[in-house]
Amino acid sequence: MFNKLISIFILLFLIPLGVNAEEIVPPPVIPEQLQDGMSIEPDIRIISQADRTVKEYRINGQLYMIKVIPEIGYPYLLIDTDGDGAFETTRSGIGEDLLVPNWVLLEW
């Protein structure tokens, strides 16, 4: 009786191990070395004006984000989401194209 109980326990313990066995995943590809003039860190240009501070973020010379910090109010971001060099605009029949600001809701 004791031997049957132990063998059932061992089978129940080993069955999940066989089910969870997966194929060996190849290691990830290592990215190439950075070339001269390339940077991972963004270049930040700070422009102080009378009523606001503007921070321009660039990677490899391409402007991808602008952070506007007004004297009164919350900071907002203008972001080039698709990398074409033009900031996203909202088109309406009212008039000019408007740049759409983004606000940071949560940070941690």
Image (spheres, rainbow, N blue to C red):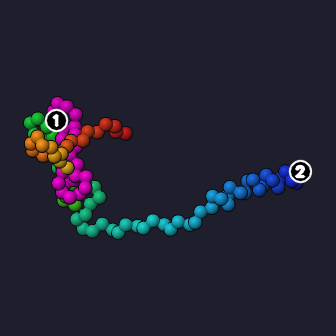
- In this view, the residue in front, 72 or 13, is 13
Mark 2 Cα-neighbour bin, 10 Å: few <14, some 14–19, many ≥20: few
Give the distance between the C-alpha atoms of the residues marked 1 and 2, in whole angstroms.
Answer: 78 Å
Q: What stretch is highlighted in magenta?
A: 63-87
Residue sticking out furthest to the top: 72
Residue 87 in picture, x, y percent from top left: 18, 51
Residue 105 sits in quarter:
top left
Q: Is mark 2 on a helix, strand or loop?
A: helix
Q: Is residue 26 magenta?
A: no
Residue at mark 2: 2
- Tell me the quadrant of the picture where the C terminus can be found: top left
Residue at image coords 37%, 66%: 31
Q: On the picture, is 5 further left or further right than 72?
A: right
Residue sticking out furthest to the front: 93
Residue 74 sits in quarter:
top left
Reply above or below: 66 against 84.
Answer: above
Give the amino acid type for the residue marked by disc 2 in the picture: Phe
Residue 106 in picture, x, y percent from top left: 34, 37
Residue at image coords 33%, 68%: 33
Q: On the picture, is 34 further left or further right than 93?
A: right
| Disc marking residue 45 | none
Residue 77 in picture, x, y percent from top left: 22, 43
Q: On the picture, is 65 further left or further right than 97?
A: right
| Disc marking residue 70 | 1
**One can see residue 66 in this view:** no
Residue at image coords 20%, 49%: 88
**One can see residue 78 in this view:** yes
Q: On the picture, is 97 further left or further right than 3?
A: left
